[in-house]
Image: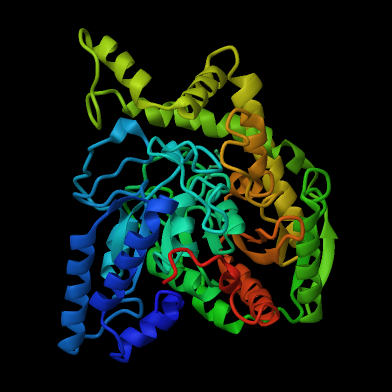
Amino acid sequence: MIRKSAAEMAKSLASGEITSVELTRAHLDQISRVDSQVNAFLHIDREGALEQAEQVDAKRRAGERLSLLAGVPLALKDVLVQKGIPTTCGSKMLEGWRPPYDSTVVRRLRENGIVILGKTNMDEFAMGSSTENSAYGPTRNPWDLTRIPGGSSGGSFAAIASFQAPFAIGTDTGGSIRQPAAVTATVGVKPTYGAVSRYGLVAFSSSLDQAGPCARTVLDAAYLHEAIAGHDPLDSTSINAPVPAVVAAAKDGNVGGMKIGVIKELQGDGYQPGVLRLFNESLEILASLGADIVEVSCKYFDYALAAYYLIAPSECSSNLARFDAMRYGIRRGEGSAEEVMNATRQIGFGREVKRRIILGTYALSSGYYDAYYGSAQKVRTLISRDFESAFKLADVLVSPTAPTTAFKIGEKANDPIAMYLNDIATIPTNLAGIGGMSLPSGLAFEDGLPAGFQIMAPAMKDDLMYKAGAALEAELVFKWQGPILNLAPKLGAR
Ligand code: GLN
């Protein structure tokens, strides 16, 4: 049962073939079997999950009308607050902190009867691409336990790739949903900025952060997307417009006549040959299904990474000022408030977070503000214009999701620039505020490891990504004689 899709689980629940308690127990058992190897979870809420499951079962027995996903379990990235449940953001700073309220995402999950199994590991405050920056040890990639699962939402994706949960919530500031999806052969969607409420999402870079669905199929991602998206008065950047019909689009999965633009700047140098080959094979499939493949150029994308690494650290330096030893989490040191604050931030934050705070503080300092932060904002506008022109030529744009397959744990730990390059293909969409999806494109010939295919759509046209993604997925599932996860090593198999 745990190897089924969330949609199939939902059907079995509705037909009475299984109960939510049984389904939740099956996942908790799998967590017990494999998570000591994977380290996907920071906190497992056994009792809470079983209690939620029991409530859904009771309602179903009483004949109440339930939402489609009611009773299906989920893993939640530890950057979204859930009332009373430890939330650490992968940081020592928040050790022992229990939030007094639910994030809007959690509230919506509950309203849909989705059972929350626990909180997943992540790079500290979502800064990273490998989940190695967690204060609680790295998460391992279920495809090869010596490799990274991507990041920063690595725990969420490792959980679904090792069947510890059918789907999960991640967040994406520069690629943290799409890049881990790519290296674990799963599906990850960063919705349009403002589509999913950020209320209760611990902020890294507020103008870029966006929560989204992590799943094993495009349709499961669509169901979860519709469950969590929608206007929220508690988030001033939330979009007040109807949620695009992503489930209908995923069911339709037709690319006949769709114009698909291949971004010239997001391939070639620095991309692993096996990743590029899979990308080109996927393009051929889309063409054979009737899509019209065109090439587009986005010449300012070459500056996206540089602009991101000024804007994101600048916002982070300001957002993380709230961890002052007075309001949340740990308190260390003695003496004046300043001494306590210094000691706490020294101990509470890891290396990468400190690096970002220093970078951002510098970029925002008077005298450098215009040269760095101001210029980066101008580049951001140019990147949005690149997208606007490209979307005049194509309905959706595509690229490989990440330049390489999963690298070894430790391989890039001391080379921040090499680490930052992982997000070269995902960062432009965050800067422009548009949506992006990653889905599996196959296993690279060099190492047999998964690679991802990225689809980007104009703002609030997220349905187009689901349409194209579902079309490609159906063909690839056929080619692999089943979902690509069938080929995954069977962790904890009995
Ligand atoms: N890897 C990028 C970073 O370190 C993106 C992280 C994210 O999307 N949260 O900033």
Where is the C terminus found, in terms of image quarters?
A: bottom left
Residue at 62% across, 36% down: 411
Give above or below for 252 relative to 153: below
Residue 241 rendering spot, x and y as whole percentages: 46, 64
Dividing the picture into quadrants, the one containing residue 35 is bottom left
Q: Is residue 139 visible?
A: yes
- Using the image as rendered, state which of residue 369 and residue 330 is in the foreground: 330
Give the x, y percent position of residue 408: 61, 43
Give the position of the N terminus as an image quadrant: bottom left
Quadrant of the rendered structure where residue 124 is?
top left
Identity of the residue drawn at 53% across and 48% down: 176
**Would you say 183 lies left or right of 349 here?**
right
Examine the rendered structure and indicate whether residue 128 appears above or below residue 67: above
Which one is nearer the viewer's eye here, 112 or 481?
Answer: 481
Answer with left or right where residue 214 lies relative to residue 48. right
- Would residue 245 be seen by someone viewing this image from the given angle? no
